[in-house]
Image: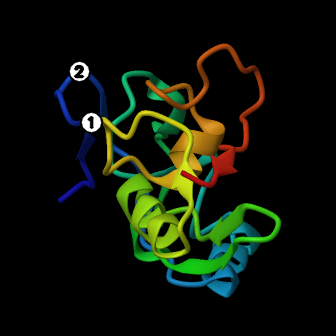
């Protein structure tokens, strides 16, 4: 049976030849090094929230949700380092534990950080052209 990916409201459907769930950077590197097994275009996807076809592919879709770790929170430099599949809610909780807060509306708490940084989605790229970092502050 073919892989079928549908966004959250059913407005976008994709049927990629390959749908993969990497768990490490090495997994992603292996995918990108094997165009026969993982045909182009190769596109990353998170929690299927996008209302645009930016993650759709008839080739390979790389679902980032298993790469969901918060790696570090730096309260001195006000930064958070995380894998692309981590959700905004996870980042918010990790920030709060350090007495920090993320400066954005977390209405879409299950949006992945990769999507927030790279895709045009609500609360992610309002007015930005090439992604953005989310400023942090002390409450």
Rate crowding at label 2 as few (under 14), some (14 to 19) or many (20 or more) other CA atoms within 10 Å: few
| Mark 2: secondary structure | loop
Q: Give the residue at x 27% y 55%.
A: 3
Q: Give the residue at x 56% y 61%.
A: 100
| Residue 128 numbered tag | none
Position above or below: 108 against 136: above
Residue 60 visible to the viewer: no
| Residue 7 numbered tag | 1
Expressed as whole percent of the image width and height from the top left, the position of residue 20 reads 43, 68
Q: Give the residue at x 17% y 27%.
A: 9
Expressed as whole percent of the image width and height from the top left, the position of residue 124 reads 54, 31
Residue at image mark 2:
11
Contact between marks 2 and 1 (CB within 8 A): the answer is yes
Position above or below: 122 against 3: above
Q: Quadrant of residue 125?
A: top right
Rate crowding at label 1 as few (under 14), some (14 to 19) or many (20 or more) other CA atoms within 10 Å: some
| Mark 1: secondary structure | loop
């Amino acid at each position: 049976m073919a892989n079928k990916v549908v966004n959250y409201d059913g407005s976008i459907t994709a049927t990629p030849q390959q749908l993969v769930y990497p768990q490490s950077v090495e997994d992603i590197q292996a995918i990108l090094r094997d165009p026969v097994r993982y045909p182009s275009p190769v596109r990353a996807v998170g929690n299927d929230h996008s209302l645009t076809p930016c993650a759709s592919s008839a080739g390979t879709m790389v679902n980032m949700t298993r790469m969901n770790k918060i790696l570090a929170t730096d309260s001195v430099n006000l930064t958070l380092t995380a894998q692309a599949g981590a959700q905004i809610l996870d980042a918010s909780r990790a920030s709060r534990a350090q007495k920090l807060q993320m400066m954005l509306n977390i209405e879409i708490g299950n949006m992945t950080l990769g999507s927030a940084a790279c895709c045009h989605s609500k609360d992610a790229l309002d007015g930005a052209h090439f992604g953005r970092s989310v400023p942090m502050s002390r409450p």
